[in-house]
Amino acid sequence: MRSAIRDGTKHAVIAEDNGVHRNTVGNMKRLLHEQGNVKPRRNQQRGRVPKISGECLETLRKMYDDAPDTYQDEAAEALTKLYGFKLDKWDVCRALKRLRYTYHKLDESGVNESNARRTHGFAPKGRKARVSRVLKRTPGWSILPGLTVDGFVALHIYQGAYNADLFYDFVEKEVLPNTTPFPGPRSVIVMDNVRFHHDPRIAEILSYHGRKCIYLPPYSPDLNPIEGCFGIMKQYMRKHSKDPTEIITNPYYFTGKPRNPRLRPR
């Protein structure tokens, strides 16, 4: 093929004689002209030039060695401020792949607030993603929300664990005023199988005021949309590394509607 190219034979003829595409012949001719042979250049950069390289790449490596649970958009924001050019999480994602850093479950050497701590991070392939956390006791908080197809209509926040008496008080003072007798709107009260939900007083007060009570079957979070709301709140806490006390006691974080005076902690 090389001799035919040097002799000036037409590309179509060379391609047909050798069973290759004419573009292949054209590429070979270009390489012969540029470098005297048809071997591709070694270490030739292909594709787009990475935004994160050199010193910036080493900074990213150190960032994840020190804090493996850093979110990619957080890393992008920090590098943008440090080096002055715009980066996004996809630039960080591609850089981590080049560094061969992969996603791992964190190996913790301490414990903090269970809902706010991040559970996964990046580390070199084959190594654990290790983080150190401050060991401290924090108060437990419980949330009782009333969720309808139109959003939240009731919310009660309590430091500690709920029991039947507290739940009865919530139903009487928060749920009943925001619902109507069956078959009106918001007249069917759906609850899961938490023990205090089955206190006889709960069904009695709901029935007395004309509400219909339905209990979900055991282990059926897929039938309970409130579980998705809890998941969103916990995800927000992990994303922003907030103190759970600040988030849970501020109705805005939970409802997104700070203007509603009824949705306030007790």
Image (cartoon, rainbow, N blue to C red):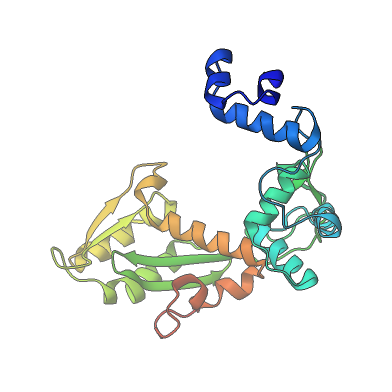
Q: Residue furthest front?
A: 7
Q: How many labels does the image show?
A: 0
- Asked if residue 88 lies left or right of residue 173, the reply is right
Q: Residue at x 43, y 51 (%)?
A: 195
Indicate the position of residue 103 as horizontal and vertical percent values.
69, 43
182 relative to 173, above or below: above
Name which quarter of the figure residue 104 lies in: top right
- Asked if residue 18 lies left or right of residue 100, the reply is left
126 relative to 19, above or below: below
Indicate the position of residue 42 as horizontal and vertical percent values.
81, 34
235 relative to 109, above or below: below
Residue 87 appears in view: yes
Q: Residue at x 73, y 50 (%)?
A: 95
Tell me the quadrant of the picture where the N terminus can be found: top right
Indicate the position of residue 249 as horizontal and vertical percent values.
56, 76
Name which quarter of the figure residue 92 lies in: bottom right
- Asked if residue 220 lies left or right of residue 1, the reply is left
34 relative to 122, above or below: above
Q: Which residue is drawn at 28% across and 77% down?
A: 177
| Of the pair 22 and 126, the residue shown nearer to us | 22
| Of the pair 226 and 35, the residue shown nearer to us | 35
Residue 119 appears in view: no
Q: Residue at x 71, y 44 (%)?
A: 97
Indicate the position of residue 248 as horizontal and vertical percent values.
56, 71
